[in-house]
Amino acid sequence: MIANPTLPEARGPLSEAVITALARGSPPEEAPREVRDAEPLGEDLQLALYVCYELHYRGFDGVDPCREWDPELLRLRGRLEDRFLPALRAESPGGTDTAAALGELLVEDPGAYGVSHHLLDTGQWWEMREYLAHRSIYHLKEADPHAWVIPRLQGESKAALVAVEFDEFGGGRGERMHAKLFADLLDGAGLDSRYGHYLDHVPAQTLATVNLMSLFGLHRALRGALVGHFAAAEITTPPGADRLARALTRLGAGAECTRFFTEHIEADAVHEQVMRRDVIGDLLAREPELAADVVLGIQATTFLEDRLAAHLLGSWRAGRTSLRRPLP
Ligand SMILES: [Fe+2]
Ligand SMILES: [Fe+2]
């Protein structure tokens, strides 16, 4: 029996409308004013969107799986996306030069000091555990949002993206799925590895990084952005994964904890090349008009990841939790 997550606690009128509709089996309250007034990257809108998207993954305990295609919920989701996507566009410099956008990610800024640097140098165990709780929202469904794009690609770009996904899903072996390696890491760190367990803990900054993937993955019109996001994620992972594996070792964690990150050091160095050359290269050879969307996917990923990093480091420097409630 698979345990699905329970519905989270609402964070405002929009998330309240969605969660109440799912809990009661009723249509969502019309909320045009709340949608218009909500902060597009804020807690309420991001949670409402996350809950809508989750119906396409595992759903929630006690919620009829048929609600996935409830037209009223889909209409509300569309209104939320009409706030989220323009906010992402507004924060992205834009352009159509995919090589330049990716090139900026290929060389790490020597002066940059991100979350993995902090955790490696001076991070404490409680900060590492918080980081893992944030990332659990995505990594326990790692690569699932990218699978939505497969039917929207053709030829070499489809074949190459599936080759990357094959690795993400463990190369045919359930115990090697990256989501499973992350669950092992959570268990090793004394955290709860049940899917969605930390949903009430994580703030909007974290939810937005996951909602981005669902938004790009679930809309065929945004297939270029999904591919751009995927490439950006693969390019930026290896150096950070190396630091995080060493940070875990420094903090005394065992091999069951470091495996997730060590696996990503080499795998993503290969994935990055496949994504750039075979997936993006072939996609743009077929559909050159998608270049601006590929760039959007890259830039929006950088924007949201930087925003999350600023939140984590700012919280920890101030000596306070980065979560909405501290871990037990
Ligand atoms: Fe992975
Ligand atoms: Fe990867």
Image (tube, rainbow, N blue to C red):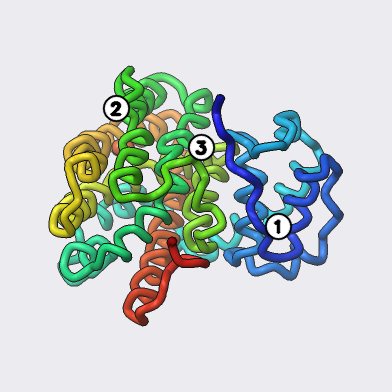
Whether residue 294 is visible, yes or no, is: yes
In the drawing, what numbered circle is on residue 176?
2
Whole-percent x, y for residue 206 in the image: 47, 58
Q: Secondary structure at mark 3?
A: helix
Q: Position of residue 176 (x, y in %)?
A: 29, 27
Q: Residues within 10 Å of mark 1 (few under 14, many from 20)?
A: many
Residue 50 versus residue 118 in the image, above or below: above
Q: Find numbered disc 1 in the image and state the secondary structure of the residue it sits on.
A: helix
Circles 2 and 1 in contact, beta carbons < 8 Å: no
Residue 14, horizontal then vertical, whole percent: 74, 59
The residue sitting at 71% across, 37% down in the picture is: 62
Nearer mark to the viewer, of 1 and 3: 1
Q: Earlier in the sequence, mark 1 or mark 3?
A: 1
Label 3 crowd (10 A; few <14 / some 14-19 / many >=20): many
Residue located at (50% from left, 59% from top): 202
Which disc is residue 223 wearing? Answer: 3
Numbered circles on residues, count:
3
Could you give the CA–CA distance between mark 2 and mark 1, rounded to whole angstroms? 35 Å
Disc number placed over residue 15 in the picture, else none? 1
Depth check: 325 or 271 in front? Answer: 325
Please tell me which residue is depicted at 20% across the width and 45% down the height of the picture: 258
Q: Residue flagged by tag 3: what amino acid is it?
A: Arg
Q: Is mark 3 within 8 Å of ligand 2?
A: no
| Amino acid type of the residue that numbered disc 1 sits on in the rendered structure | Ser
Q: Quadrant of residue 264?
A: top left
Residue 164 in sight from this viewpoint: no
Q: What is the CA distance from the residue labelled 3 to the residue labelled 2?
A: 27 Å
